[in-house]
Image (spheres, helix red, strand yellow):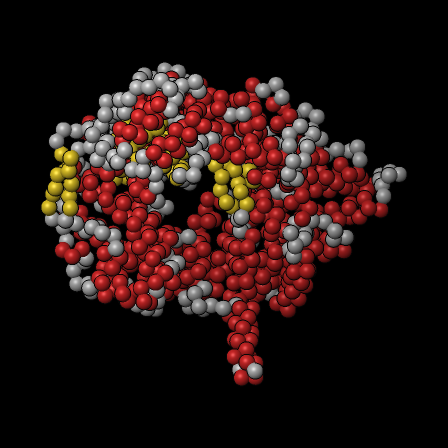
């Protein structure tokens, strides 16, 4: 049966085929290859889950015809504006509206956006110039592309089968002509801006300094100039000071003179009454109040006036629509190549940031090209500069002095490297050096905003708003006074100011506001922090906050809050890395870091960062030798040592794991031999629990080596000694290890008993992580007994829990077992898809497959052998390759299509019974 996903893909494919057909109709002037298709499909993505795609109504021909009809002239040059062989558009429209009116409205809404993109393509074709199209971007090359808005004669435009001439827009003296350098990227921003300026009267392009607001505004005004028969006027405000009148500057741009503040407005109202004019106000951020008053007055006086403003901060008046201008897209973090995951060789750069750098580098150094050998260096430069166009242009000019490799090596010191002398000579002084750009932003900030900027610059990878309020010296209670002298309301105002000034981005993450800085903005804040005589207090506050966060997470791992804390720590990984690997400041107690280490083991394991976590723990253990001053200090160190030993074992580093375990065991033994008078009962309980934890860890090491007698002995000893109050979760782990040893010995009944006992304990505590792995082992027990349905039931439940805590490595472990079970029941193709997808998770993880358990590795080997025999090498290769190209979650969805777990079946039957009883005559009565 055709799925809704398949129907959507066919529809999107038909649409881009239609665009290809239009390209042929206009003589192939515009190339509509794969990148442009990506743009269209991206715009269509929001339609993917529309109920219409799950219906059985035909969509390929009739619906496409209706959809295109709603777009106006999407196919100029084709008769009746629809594809050959389709049904009448009006009939399709009526049928669709009757069947699903909401869907029709959604299609019309998204169609308006796409029509703006197509209008740009039409205009490009009408001018007769070829474009190189990059992903989400138009890359213009060659001097003929850079034309001012004012031109002699008319402008040729394409409409249907013919061409018409429209008058060229009037551009008054003083209007800025377009710069001679090529314009790169911003297709979607131009589409959105073009639509907004038609609907609203004030559009403000807002973004951080150097992001390209002025260039985008210039290009946008050029693209929409034909809509304004009385001209486009540009006003540069960068050199105005607060004592000057914005109104006077606007009047001067229109050729009017006046010294009084409001005289130009009156003259403008008289001169422009009834005229359709577009006004561009550039660089408003330092004159916000005056700009807001002037624009509001102009809009009230001139009903046909449209205004585009550029600013680092919105004008905040009622008529305003804000278009956020973000940095150019940069390559994703991956294998260091800007290529799709399914590509096997180097390709040309596809991101707008790479395209801009390559274009400007070629201008600075003729003959420069991005190749497979230098691509990594280009990517590093683009990423370090956050895709900021001005920074990339200055960096490209440095290639006159440096090689690309030298530039990439020095780019970390961006403000020194991109200092005076690197920018365009005719540019405004604030645009000639990277530091000058941010000095201007700094000058526009209040003292509170500057303090918040410095504090947030310590946060790597962003920070939650609630955390930022704490870090900046406030408590959540509105208006509460803090030791630092700041009030919560003041801190919130400072953070809001940084967001408004485009220095901090915000995002909604799971219903919580998360703040994030570009690395370049953050680097500037760190430089200011180093110059601050009180900078050390900012650092201490940051370390103390995140060390405490990790410690609280560790204390909750043995409770029902486990999943919440794992999700809480996941986005803070970069902050945790920073505080763990950096040298502690003088006077910081070792206890703080050792307590935090207890929150790292499950975080690093579930996030797939086992190797990094093992390295962190080695750093902590080496930096903080085991103390001897008190039992409490020894216990804290031993807990950190347990985390180190566990992660080292999971990473396959058995020698170092044994070394750390041995040190901890000796420390506990020495403490037990001479407890001293202060050795209380509570401390004895903790010592016993830690002793049990290290016995369990030694049992795990023996199990990985398939030393089953030794593994069982250690696990039984751990169960006998432990008191089970620890968040290290020793009891269920020891039971699981005994159960796994029984599985490996073929003792099915004993294994089931031990595993069910451990599962009950974990469910009682709310320990989601152990439930995942216990269900996994139970699936293996049932699978080895040939009970495939029961095994799949357990495995599906485990995968649901893994998804809940976002356990990447657990997902890989479970998927390998799924491939074995699918192969065992004869579903060779699905098994091969899973094998291909899961290999993409294991290979870059640096973790031994199945954490080194040979028993599980044997299942995978058997699965591979079986599906190869069933499919043959050619079909196996195709299916495996397809799995490699798909996300693991998508493959799992395919594999489990139509499968219900036992709990789902019971729930469905209960719901059905409930509905039946409610609909019965007795229930209705």
Q: Is residue 575 visible?
A: yes
Q: Residue 739 falls in which quadrant of the image?
A: bottom right
Position of residue 425 measured from the top left corner of the image (x, y, whole percent)? 32, 16
- Residue ID at (20%, 64%): 88
In front here: 859 or 355? Answer: 355
Task: List the single residue furthest toward the left.
Answer: 162
Write the residue at 63% across / 66% down. Answer: 752
Taking the image as drawn, is residue 758 in sight?
no
Which residue is at a point 50% across and 45% down the rendered structure image?
508
Front in this rendered view, residue 718 or 289: 289
- Left or right relative to 558: residue 29: left
Residue 567 position, x and y percent, is 57, 48
User: Split into 4 quadrants, where in the image is the N terminus?
Assistant: bottom left
Left-right relation of 504 to 197: right
Q: Nearer the viewer, residue 201 or 65?
A: 201
Quarter in which the C terminus is drawn: bottom right
**Side of 433 where 356 appears, left or right:** left
Query: Could you say where residue 64 lies in the image, as x and y percent from the top left?
Result: 25, 59
What percent of the width, then of the height, locates residue 719? Answer: 73, 56
Residue ranking furthest to the right: 677
Rendering quarter of residue 627: top right
């Amino acid at each position: 049966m055709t799925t809704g996903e398949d129907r959507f893909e066919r529809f999107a494919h038909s649409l881009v085929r239609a665009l290809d057909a239009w390209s042929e109709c206009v003589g192939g002037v515009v190339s509509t290859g794969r990148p442009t298709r990506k743009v269209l499909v991206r715009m269509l993505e929001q339609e993917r889950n529309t109920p219409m795609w799950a219906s059985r109504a035909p969509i390929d021909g009739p619906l496409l015809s209706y959809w295109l009809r709603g777009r106006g002239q999407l196919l100029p040059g084709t008769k009746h504006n629809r594809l050959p062989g389709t049904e009448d558009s009006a009939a399709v429209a009526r049928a669709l509206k009757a069947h699903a009116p909401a869907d029709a409205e959604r299609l019309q809404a998204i169609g308006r956006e796409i029509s703006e993109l197509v209008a740009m393509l039409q205009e490009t074709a009408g001018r007769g110039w070829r474009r190189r199209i990059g992903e989400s971007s138009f890359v213009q090359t060659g001097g003929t592309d850079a034309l001012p808005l004012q031109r002699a004669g008319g402008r040729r435009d394409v409409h249907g089968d013919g061409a018409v001439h429209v008058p060229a827009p009037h551009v008054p003296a003083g209007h800025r002509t377009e710069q001679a350098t090529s314009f790169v990227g911003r297709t979607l921003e131009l589409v959105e801006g073009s639509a907004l300026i038609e609907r609203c009267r004030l559009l403000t392009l807002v973004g951080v300094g150097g992001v390209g607001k002025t260039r985008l505004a210039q290009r946008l005004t050029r693209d929409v100039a034909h809509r304004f028969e009385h001209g486009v006027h540009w006003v540069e405000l960068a050199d105005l000071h607060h004592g000057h009148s914005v109104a006077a500057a606007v009047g001067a741009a229109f050729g009017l003179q006046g010294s009084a503040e409001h005289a130009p407005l009156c003259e403008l109202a008289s001169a422009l009454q009834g005229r359709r004019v577009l006004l561009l106000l550039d660089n408003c951020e330092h004159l916000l109040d005056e700009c807001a008053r002037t624009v509001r007055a102009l809009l009230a006086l001139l009903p046909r006036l449209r205004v585009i403003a550029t600013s680092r901060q919105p004008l905040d008046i009622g008529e305003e629509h804000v278009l956020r201008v973000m940095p150019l897209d940069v390559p994703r973090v991956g294998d260091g190549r800007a290529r799709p995951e399914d590509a096997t060789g180097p390709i040309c750069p596809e991101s707008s940031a790479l395209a801009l750098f390559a274009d400007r580098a070629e201008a600075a150094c003729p003959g420069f090209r991005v190749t497979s050998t230098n691509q990594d260096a280009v990517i590093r430069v683009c990423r370090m500069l956050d895709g900021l166009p001005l920074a990339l242009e200055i960096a490209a000019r440095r290639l006159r002095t440096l090689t690309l490799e030298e530039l990439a090596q020095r780019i970390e010191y961006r403000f020194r490297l991109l200092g005076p002398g690197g920018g365009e000579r005719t540019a405004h002084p604030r645009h000639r050096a990277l530091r000058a750009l941010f000095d201007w932003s700094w000058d526009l900030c209040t003292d509170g905003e500057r303090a918040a900027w410095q504090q947030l610059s310590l946060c790597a990878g962003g920070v939650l708003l609630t955390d930022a309020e704490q870090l900046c010296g406030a408590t959540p209670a509105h208006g509460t006074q803090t030791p630092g002298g700041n009030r919560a309301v003041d801190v919130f105002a400072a953070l809001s100011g940084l967001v408004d000034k485009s220095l901090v981005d915000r995002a909604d993450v799971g219903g919580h506001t998360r703040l994030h800085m570009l690395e370049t903005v953050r680097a500037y804040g760190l430089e200011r922090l180093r110059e601050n005589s009180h900078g050390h207090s900012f650092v201490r506050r940051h370390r103390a906050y995140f060390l405490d966060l990790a410690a609280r997470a560790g204390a909750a791992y043995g409770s029902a809050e486990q999943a919440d804390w794992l999700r809480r720590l996941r986005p803070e990984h970069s902050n945790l890395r920073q505080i763990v690997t950096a040298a502690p400041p003088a006077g910081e107690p070792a206890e703080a870091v050792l307590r935090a280490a207890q929150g790292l083991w499950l975080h690093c394991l579930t996030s797939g960062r086992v190797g990094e976590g093992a390295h962190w723990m080695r750093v902590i253990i080496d930096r903080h030798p085991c103390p001897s001053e008190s039992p409490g200090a020894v216990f804290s160190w031993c807990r950190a040592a347990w985390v180190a030993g566990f992660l080292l074992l999971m990473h396959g580093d058995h020698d170092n794991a044994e070394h750390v375990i041995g040190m901890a065991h000796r420390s506990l033994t020495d403490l037990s031999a001479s407890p001293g008078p202060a050795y209380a009962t509570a401390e004895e309980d903790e010592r016993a629990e830690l002793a049990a934890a290290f016995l369990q860890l030694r049992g795990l090491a023996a199990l990985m080596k398939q030393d089953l007698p030794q593994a069982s002995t250690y696990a039984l000893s751990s169960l006998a000694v432990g008191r089970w109050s620890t968040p290290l979760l020793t009891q269920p782990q020891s039971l699981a290890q005994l159960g796994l040893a029984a599985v490996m010995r073929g003792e099915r009944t004993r294994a089931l008993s031990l595993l069910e006992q451990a599962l009950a304990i974990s469910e009682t505590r709310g320990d989601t992580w152990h439930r995942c792995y216990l269900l996994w082992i139970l699936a293996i027990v049932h699978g080895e007994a040939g009970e495939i349905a029961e095994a799949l039931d357990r495995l599906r439940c485990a995968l649901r829990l893994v998804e809940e805590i976002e356990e990447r490595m657990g997902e890989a472990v479970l998927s390998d077992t799924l491939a074995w079970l699918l192969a065992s029941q004869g579903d060779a193709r699905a098994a091969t898809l899973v094998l291909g997808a899961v290999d993409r998770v294991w290979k870059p993880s640096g973790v031994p497959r199945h954490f080194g358990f040979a028993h599980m590795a044997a299942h995978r080997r058997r699965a591979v052998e079986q599906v190869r025999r069933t499919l043959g090498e050619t079909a196996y290769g195709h299916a495996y390759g397809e799995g490699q190209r798909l996300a693991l979650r998508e493959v799992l969805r395919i594999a489990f299509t139509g499968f219900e777990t036992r709990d789902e079946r019971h729930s469905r039957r209960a719901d059905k019974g409930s509905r039946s009883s409610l609909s019965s005559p007795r229930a209705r009565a």
